[in-house]
Amino acid sequence: MDEQTNEKKEKLLKQIDLQKNFMIYLQYLLEKTQKNRRKDRVYENKKTGRKYFIMPTLLERFFDIEFTKYIMLKDRYFLEFGEESINEYINTKREFPMPTKQISARVGRHTYNFYEIYYLLLYYFKTKYNIKITDSFLYLIYVATNIPPAVLAYMQLHSDFWLKRYKKRDINWEKLFAEHDELKKAVEMVEERYLRGLKSDKQNSVG
């Protein structure tokens, strides 16, 4: 009984430590983004009188997403990191860099630019599981893959536009996965965690 109590205590302490480290990370993002954050997003051209909306920077947007996810999901997904400290995870070398040059892939009659691969990942889950592209699902992608935070923030901003375009296309997923191993691996990693989450939710609802 004492051993079980000690195990629970150690597990709780590890989770507290992860959350503390994550809050330090959020504080870092806060200092980087909030100091120069514009309070008024509307810019007016004095000569023409036209008004423009100034979009938040990717880092600002990512802070907003991360902070919201921390509040909503800390208890559910923090255990996905296991014993790995959040700081080590953040500093891990990423394998999904934002491409600096344009690479294209032809599938049927359509040509896909390399950066669209990230949106195809979202579209796969949208069509197969009818998933809404929420912050919680993006967080699941962040935990499961090496896709950089800035790319996820960009995807969050523009997902509606790209997903509407894909509805008009007949995508051969088997061929696409064969040509793009990094996309196939990302889908497998996200799918495995997503299905595990569904199974856990069903067990909790039954209990």
Image (cartoon, rainbow, N blue to C red):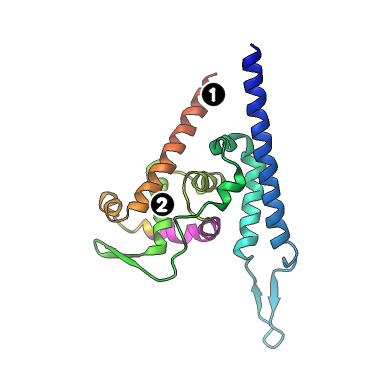
Q: Is residue 38 left or right of residue 126?
A: right
Quadrant of the rendered image containing residue 4: top right
Magenta span has 45?
A: no
Q: Is residue 177 left or right of residue 163?
A: left
Q: Amino acid at mark 2?
A: Leu
Magenta region: which residues? 149-165
Name, please, the residue furthest toward the bottom. 47
Q: Nearer the viewer, mark 1 or mark 2?
A: 2
Quadrant of the rendered image containing residue 75: top right
First in sequence: mark 1 or mark 2?
2
- Disc 1 marks which residue? 205
Q: Nearer the viewer, residue 71 or 186?
A: 186
Residue occupying the point 67% across, 42% down: 71
Residue occupying the point 62% across, 22% down: 7
Quadrant of the rendered image containing residue 168: bottom left
> Where's the C terminus, which quadrant?
top right
